[in-house]
Amino acid sequence: MLYPPIHELKKNVDSKYLVVTMAAKRARHLQDEPEDLILDEYKTLKTVSRALEEIAENKVTEQG
C-alpha cells in the first residue's frame, strides 16, 4: 500500500505525474546525499517513500 495515499499527495501537487517526477528526482538526491534530510522523522528507510512523505508535507517543490 502506498503511503502517503495519492489523495494526500495531490493536495499539494496538481498532477499525479508531477508527483512521480518530483519523487523520483528527490529520491535520487537522497540516494546521492543521504544526510540531506528535510523531515525530523520518517516512517521508512526507503528513499522513494521518504521523498513521498516530504511531498505530502509540502516540503518539496517542483523546482527541487
Image: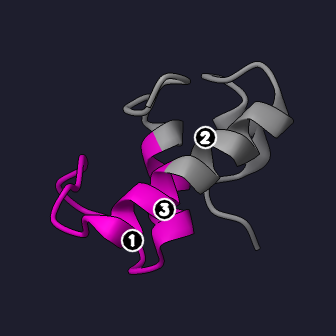
Which residue is painted at 42% across and 77% down in the image? 44
Whole-percent x, y for residue 16 in the image:
82, 36
Residue 8 visible here: no
Query: Label 1 belongs to which residue?
Result: 31
Indicate the amino acid at tag 2.
Met
Specify whether 59 is left or right of 52.
left
Specify whether 49 is left or right of 58.
right
Specify whether 24 is left or right of 5.
left
Label 2 environment density (alpha carbons within 10 Å; few <14, some 14–19, many ≥20): many
Query: Label 2 belongs to which residue?
Result: 22
Quarter of the figure with residue 7: top right
Q: Is residue 45 magenta?
A: yes
Which residue is painted at 17% across and 55% down in the image? 40
User: Vertical placement of 8 versus 5: above or below?
Assistant: above
Q: Quadrant of the C terminus?
A: top left
Whole-percent x, y for residue 50 in the image:
44, 62
How far apart are labels 3 and 2 at the CA level? 10 Å
Q: Is residue 31 magenta?
A: yes
Is the Cβ of the residue at disc 1 closer than 8 Å to that at disc 3?
yes
How far apart are labels 1 and 3 at the CA level? 5 Å
Q: What segment carries the magenta color?
A: 26-54
Which residue is painted at 76% across and 74% down in the image? 1
Query: Label 3 belongs to which residue?
Result: 28
How far apart are labels 2 and 1 at the CA level? 14 Å
Indicate the amino acid at tag 1.
Gln
Specify whether 43 is left or right of 53.
left
Indicate the amino acid at tag 3.
Arg
Label 3 environment density (alpha carbons within 10 Å; few <14, some 14–19, many ≥20): some
